[in-house]
Amino acid sequence: MRVLVVAAHPDDEVLGCGGTIAKLSNEGHDIHIMILGEGSTSRSQDRGQADMTLVEALRENSHQAAKTLGAKEVCLRDLPDNRFDAVPLLEIVKIVEEAVEKLNPEIIYTHHGGDLNIDHTLTHRAVLTATRPIKGQPVREVYAFEIPSSTEWAFQRLEPVFRANVFEDISATLETKINALSHYETETRAFPHPRSPEALRAIARRWGSVVGGEAVEAFELVRSVRLKKQ
């Protein structure tokens, strides 16, 4: 099975579905990660004056995280951090379309459309546009993940609200997810921040308690198309 994870920023792939990536990799599936944005320059008022050493560090971090999770490859693009709304949506769509055409994934994991972060919401829309279920579309299933410190911080005031309805047991890979996130030293935070290791464990165990598991990642199924192959 070929799986593509489309994330807006370096670390989103780990936060959103790191445990599931590691689990699927352990099961022998091919996992590809594409990260659309550089993830750093919004910390400067002027992108042109941003410290590009931080961008390069995040790029290296993403490769280390992907290796820890067992992903086959990570593709890094360079969209402006927290400024995806300054880029024509068509440009983002074409980036995703290019990856779909190259990889022919059957499943995509990506951001939820109701996140507080504008890059996340535009990534979600670009994925839906690029994977329209027309004849010949290889993507059969699309899942949306939550990002701690973005999805819940919308406080259910942005539509659509995240409604988890698919749950993946990551009790065997939760610590792999935590280890992968540790490569992103500039993105992790101390507890009680949602991007702390303690909070990520609590989130996984909370979802586990919802569905009778030890540690779980939650997703919202956007679409599942099951047609007889021609």
Image (spheres, helix red, strand yellow):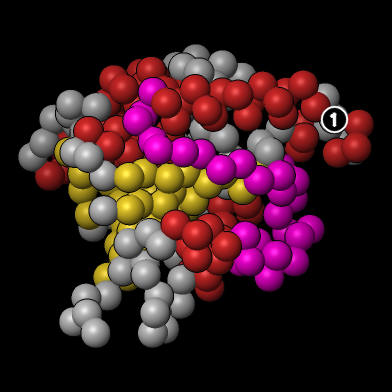
Residue stretch rendered in magenta on the structure: 68-95
Image height of 145 relative to 25, above or below:
below
Q: Residue 156: x percent and y percent?
A: 45, 55
Determine whether the residue tagged by mark 1 lies in a helix, strand or loop.
loop
Horizontal side of 148 relative to 36 (left or right) equals left
Q: Which residue is labeled 1 in the image?
A: 50
Find residue 61 and report its image quarter. top right
The residue shown at (39%, 79%) is 136
Task: Residue lying at the far left in this picture: please name it.
Answer: 212
Q: Residue 97: x percent and y percent?
A: 55, 66
Find residue 21 and report its image quarter. top left
- 7 magenta-colored: no
The residue shown at (22%, 80%) is 229
The residue shown at (63%, 29%) is 59
Horizontal side of 12 relative to 139 (left or right) equals right
Name the residue nearer the viewer: 212 or 22. Answer: 22
Horizontal side of 219 relative to 146 (left or right) equals left
- 72 magenta-colored: yes
Which corner quadrant holds the C terminus?
bottom left
Res 216 seen here? no
The residue shown at (85%, 30%) is 50
